[in-house]
Image (cartoon, rainbow, N blue to C red):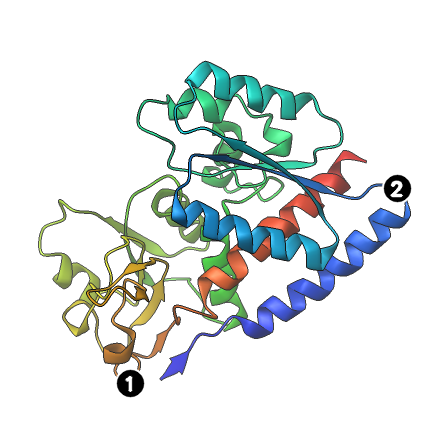
Amino acid sequence: MTILYSDDLAEKLDESIKGRVEKLSKEGNTPCLAIVRVGENPNDISYEKGLLKKSDIYGIEVKQVLLDAEITTEELIAEIEKLNSDDHVTGVILFRPLPKHIDDKEVEESLDYRKDVDAMTSKSLAKVFQGETDGFQPATPYACMKLLEAYDIDLKGKNVAIIGRSMVLGKPLAMMMLNENATVTICHSRTKDLPEVTKAADIVVSATGRAKSVTRDYVNPDSIVVDVGVSADADGKLSGDADFEDLKDYVAGITPRTHGIGKITSTLLMDQVVQAKEKSL
């Protein structure tokens, strides 16, 4: 059994990003990330703190745009358009999901795709779906792909079950894996006999946010489990979708909740901020 830690990959990425930012800064081209947060969602605030810490380590500037939860769609679009026209801002991340009264799609499409470092616009996603590699990648699916690559897990011919069909993870990850010649099944709340579907897969990716929901009933001893979900368990402690303690000595490989996918997601987002600056020169 292998625990798929991301520490070594994170260290390599850190070195690359630091070196590139240092070079850009010496030339007067320091990258700048704009963080747009609507409301006080604890998950958003936690992610924001992580990005601020990362940016400080790398020397990337940050512009925080903190907005009231009652903001209208039109007002939010106006804020996005200000960032589009701000030449100092290299990339923009908008925390999602947005409050229910906001038109998500209209807001997402208002962002200049050249600053879309988390790949939420249709132009960015089209490149992912078409298998083009010259655009930005959605950070969390990208992290899944990079970690599997780091462990030399070849996707060619593999059966993959992804639990979760969102545009943030499930759908783009499916297309990225298809581009590597995997056979992918996207599962969701209406999937019949879900445990049987996932148990038959070589690789199981879960992003439901249901703590410890992936148990031995969902996998087999040869399974690779990629755990993307984070939520509180019955004891109020943060947990992944996978029941890690139950699975770690049962499956062939599994990502831990800490030092796993989450650790490199923000790192890869920052890498794309640097790419955005490099492309703009």
Q: Which type of secondary structure does the marked residue at label 2 adopt?
A: loop
Location of mark 2 (residue): 28
At horizontal 63% and vertical 21% (from top left) the residue drawn is: 82
Q: Which type of secondary structure does the marked residue at label 1 adopt?
A: loop
Closer to the camera, 93 or 38?
38
Query: Is residue 91 left or right of 123 when viewed as pictured?
Result: right
Q: Position of residue 167 (x, y in %)?
A: 37, 39
Judge whether 213 appears above or below 163 on screen: below
Answer few, some or many: residues within 10 Å of disc 1's Cα (few below 14, many 20 plus, some between 14 and 19).
some
Location of mark 1 (residue): 249
Dot 1 amino acid type: Asp
Figure label count: 2
Q: Position of residue 200 (x, y in %)?
A: 20, 66
Residue 171 image label: none
The picture quadrant where one finds residue 213 is bottom left
Dot 2 amino acid type: Gly
Earlier along the polypeptide chain: callout 2 or callout 1? Answer: 2
Q: Which part of the image, by quadrant, shows the N terminus?
A: bottom left
At horizontal 56% and vertical 25% (from top left) the residue drawn is: 111
At horizontal 75% and vertical 27% (from top left) the residue drawn is: 87
Answer few, some or many: residues within 10 Å of disc 2's Cα (few below 14, many 20 plus, some between 14 and 19).
few
Q: Which part of the image, by quadrant, shows the C terminus?
A: top right
The mark closer to the camera, 2 or 1, is 2
Judge whether 133 appears above or below 225 on screen: above
Query: Is residue 60 left or right of 272 when viewed as pictured?
Result: right
Q: Is there CB contact under 8 Å for labels 2 and 1?
A: no
Judge whether 217 appears above or below 198 on screen: below
Closer to the camera, 161 or 98?
98
> Farthest residue toward the right?
27
At horizontal 41% and vertical 55% (from top left) the residue drawn is: 181
